[in-house]
Amino acid sequence: MSTRPRLTLIAAVSEDGYISRGQGVPWDLPRDRVHFRATTAGKWLLLGRRTYAEMLGWFRDHTPLVLTRDASFVPPIGKAVRSVPQALDLATKAGVEEIFVCGGSAAYELAFPHADRLFMTHVGTRLGAGVAFPKIGTPPWRLVSSVDYPADAENAFAMRFADYRRG
């Protein structure tokens, strides 16, 4: 009997809860980029089509699953899926232990009810408006670890890497 993979949402979120101003990542944080690459190395990723297109050059050792309503869409790398349960089913059959949801907002919203873990970078800035990340409430989420980093010459904003678990 196989168990379903852990579903982890990974995102960088402003102090006021936004992941973007509408397109792309609104900050350049090399520390977060290194963290993202190290955390997701060799993993399956679930992404919306726009995020997938923005990240096409990133997929070296990843297996991207593109969440799309367009049944005719065939990604050049990875596979198209129509739902989060379909992505989980594919990963279960492949014996995958964890899938990382990397955005955008619709992918996060659809995956949030199924999520087991949130791996967040809390960025020390406010965007004021834009594309919001789902609200993290307690319960069901509990913070299990976090590491703070100050702003520095390469990273314009302070950040906190935080690991939340459901339950």
Image (cartoon, helix red, strand yellow):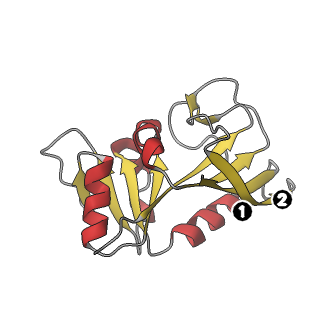
Give residue 30's position: percent from left, percent from top: 69, 60
Amino acid under label 2?
Answer: Tyr
The single residue placed furthest to the top in the displayed view is: 129
Q: Amino acid at mark 1?
A: Arg
Q: Which mark is residue 31?
A: 1
The percent coordinates of residue 48 (x first, y second) are 37, 45
Position of 29 with respect to 62 (left or right) is right
Up-down relation of residue 23 to residue 8 (above or below): above
**Helix or strand or loop: what does disc 1 sit on?**
helix
Quadrant in which the N terminus is drawn: bottom left
Q: Are the two marked residues, 1 and 2, in contact with CB atoms closer than 8 angstroms? A: yes
- Identified at 51% across, 68% down, the residue is 40
Give residue 111's quadrant in the image.
top left
Judged left or right of residue 4, residue 119 is: right
Nearest the camera: 112 or 3?
3
Total label count? 2
Please report the residue visible at 50 percent of the width from the left and 73 percent of the height from the top: 41
Q: Residues within 10 Å of mark 1 (few under 14, many from 20)?
A: few
Give the Cα distance between marks 1 and 2: 9 Å
Residue at 72% x, 47% y is 122
Residue of label 2:
149
- Give above or below for 17 relative to 49: above
Q: Position of residue 158 (x, y in %)?
A: 82, 50
Q: Nearer the viewer, residue 95 or 156?
A: 95
Viewer-nearest residue: 15 or 142 = 142
In the rendered view, does 94 fall on the left or right side of 143? left
Is residue 28 shown to the viewer in this render? Answer: no
